[in-house]
Amino acid sequence: KKERTFLYVRMVLRPFRPILAWIFNLLEEFLFRIPAYNALCETYRPSAIILGTLSEPEDIVWLALARRREIPAHAVDFPWSYLENRLWSVPRTANIHVWTEGMKNELMTLFPFSEKRVHVSGSQRYDWYKKKFPTISREEFFQRIGMDPKKRLMTYFAGTPYWNPYESGIAERILQKIATGELPKDMQLMVRLGWKLSPSDDFVALTKKYPNFIVQSADELPHQEYPSHLVYYSDVSLSTFSSLALDAAALDRPHIFTGLTGLSKPHPDEEGIAQIFEYEFMKSAVRAGGVRVAYDAKTFFSLLSGYLADASQDHEGRKKLVEEILGTID
């Protein structure tokens, strides 16, 4: 209901976006005058301000300062879902660096924005996979995260329960099948929780029941090298819909989206979880064949067993996904 409400509000406001952007720009330039930021500019006289995105509160403050002082601003690190479901207002005045021509066309279609300020410059955050990666050996990395380097690894990147409250149920079914030998007995499972998430009681109970299971919070080991190496060293990685599927594709590792509840019988929330995959950015990733979606337990464990037997499955799909969504990784 909330998603639909936002959709209707945006439809009503769409014709008025340019004037609203102009008004908000003026208001922000007037309101956001922070002495410490001004002092930095006076001291260092920056010739550019580089930001990750355009709509986070911190970004808006810096963009207001950049406009007021006529300092060129550059937004360089959009998430893959940013244009479709995170950027609602007309982008503030800045140079926008996007991954591909397709991403540029999407931006120009969605928003009235100057084309000369949009630059296709690749997906910088993924470039390091083509240079000096991995940076940590398997043995050292497994010791850091408390896993056994002699065993195979599966990683489940768990998100907020708002999107899928049944991830602990899915993890439990995986652990059960490892215990019975339906999945390889030398397999161990790590659940890496998202930012500011603590292990639920269900996850804690599973750590006590299964010795080959660990839950890790992103806040404990926050550096990007940890999820990146988890993807690289895992036989297969899982998530409800994480952009780490792009990392997996860049590293040519299998990734599965868990569009199921993890329960033994149908559940009404399954419909809501499945709607995640109606976003166009999700559709394009799945169409490329570089990541698979499992909507039911039978499909899920079939995909899982297939990847564990042959990780090269869907190699061409992952290659296509990288080309279409990330462009050139150099």
Image (cartoon, grey):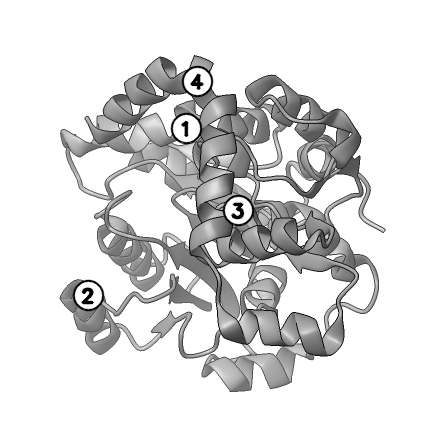
Q: Secondary structure at mark 3?
A: loop
- Disc 4 to disc 2, how far (Cα)? 44 Å
Disc 4 marks a residue whose amino acid type is Phe
Which class describes the residues within 10 Å of circle 3: few (<14), some (14-19), or many (20+)?
Answer: some
Q: Who's the residue at 48% across and 36% down the image?
A: 87
Nearer-N-terminus badge (1/2): 2
Q: Earlier in the sequence, mark 4 or mark 1?
A: 4
Residue that carries the numbered disc 4 in the rendered image: 16
| Pointer 1 residue | 277
Q: Residue at x 35, y 53 (%)?
A: 159
Question: What whole-number distance in Å separates the C-alpha atoms at marks 2 and 3?
Answer: 23 Å
Q: Earlier in the sequence, mark 4 or mark 2?
A: 4
Q: CA distance from mark 1 to mark 2?
A: 25 Å
* Residue 219 sits above or below residue 55 on the image: below
Kindly identify which residue carries mark 3.
Answer: 243
Tell me which corner region of the image, top left, top right, bottom left or bottom right, holds residue 259.
top left
Q: Residue at x 58, y 51 (%)?
A: 63
Judged by depth in the image, the label closer to the viewer, 4 or 1, is 4
Rendered image: mark on residue 200: 2
Q: Position of residue 179 (x, y in %)?
A: 30, 63
Q: Amino acid at mark 3?
A: Ser
In this orientation, does residue 282 appear?
yes
Q: Secondary structure at mark 4?
A: helix
